[in-house]
Amino acid sequence: MIRLAIAGMAHPHVLYLFNELPRQPDVRLVAVSEPDAALRDAYTDHAAGRPVYADHREMLSDHQVDVVAVNGAYADRADVILDALTAGAQVIADKPICTSLDQLATIEATASRTGNIVSAMFEKRGYPVTLAARRLLADGLLGDLSLLASTGPHQLRHRKRPPWFFGKDYGGILGDLAVHDADMVLALTGATGGHVVGSTGKRAYPEYPQFHDHGAMLLVAGDTTATIDAHWLAPEAARGNGGYEMRIVGTRGTAQLRWTEARLDVATHGRDAWQETLPPGRRPAEDFFTALLSGRAPEVSTTETITASRIALLAQHSADNGGTVEHWSQTHSG
């Protein structure tokens, strides 16, 4: 049995955790915390009668837990993760897990010292399109991976966002949105080092002078070059954010991962374009809990979490400093 506490409900991604519970009978929610009273009220029904705290430290003091799910305001997440690790808990966290390289270094050191896991919910890993594309790469159908290009449009709907979202506590668009695709590059290439250059800008929302609404990075990962863009400019009258996509270019073929459309278009030197059959997907929190219950490590380990986060934060640092070239290497945090 896993005793779970949820610390923070500042983003709707907390529903990944609440929705997973009915599917995991050996995971028991024991308590939740959230400093914002309005958010505590908004998720009352999901807490289902469990104790609700304003302070996560009080919650951790009152309850012995095995896992803490971290989903608070971005700038607060690092402290919550550190407190959870120190309390002896494993951590599953929404992205971004933190907003600065200094915070990331402290999380990495604490995870190493305690031996506990920090696993980000990089949900693109479990999409059927991703699983099918990884199978094609593993089978060698596309040859050696050469180029990747991804795009991440998002609707801002700024009037529904909290004030902290538009200031320094946000941490930057590359640290927030592009981290997903940085992780995908790592998952697809297996690269353990390279360099990254970032750029961000603002073309809308003058009422938020610190908020950059679009960004991109050039990421070199081993022998593969990737371009990743993300923005908060998706048309708000449209249904949904728009097309999350990634293009894979290999030496023997190409694949277009159309995540939003649940479609994988493939072509090779030996076969004209086709739509690949997709396997069942995985829910965002499914593998983490299934892995712990079966005694294995989750796919998104501390190493994967820290490395993807470092790349995204280095890209953000590059953007904030005029496009400096930042070198990265994979950690080995467990």
Image (cartoon, rainbow, N blue to C red):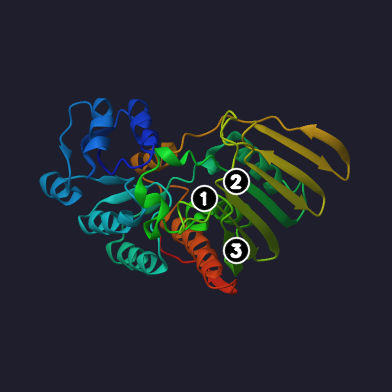
Counting residues from the N terminus, which is met first, the one under dot 1 or under dot 3? 1
Image quadrant holding the C terminus, namely bottom left
Disc 1 residue type (three-letter): Leu
| The disc label shown at residue 152, or none | 2
Q: Nearer the viewer, residue 65 or 314?
A: 314
On the image, the x and y values in percent for residue 209 come to: 46, 58
Q: Nearer the viewer, mark 3 or mark 2?
A: 3
Distance from disc 1 to disc 3, alpha carbons, whole Å, reads: 13 Å
Q: Secondary structure at mark 3?
A: strand
On the image, the x and y values in percent for residue 2 come to: 26, 39
Q: Secondary structure at mark 1?
A: helix
- Left or right: residue 215 versus residue 270 is left
Counting residues from the N terminus, which is met first, the one under dot 3 or under dot 2? 2
Q: Is residue 332 above or below residue 5?
A: below
Q: Is residue 176 above or below residue 310?
A: above
Task: Judge whether residue 1 can be spotted in this image.
Answer: no
Which residue position holds label 3?
199
Label 3–label 2 contact, CB within 8 A: no
Q: Quadrant of residue 199?
A: bottom right
Distance from disc 1 to disc 2, alpha carbons, whole Å, reads: 7 Å
- Left or right: residue 39 versus residue 287 is left
Image quadrant holding the N terminus, namely top left
On the image, the x and y values in percent for residue 80 come to: 27, 54
Which residue is found at the position 53% from the left and 50% from the top?
180
Which residue is found at the position 70% from the left and 65% from the top?
223
Which residue position holds label 1?
177
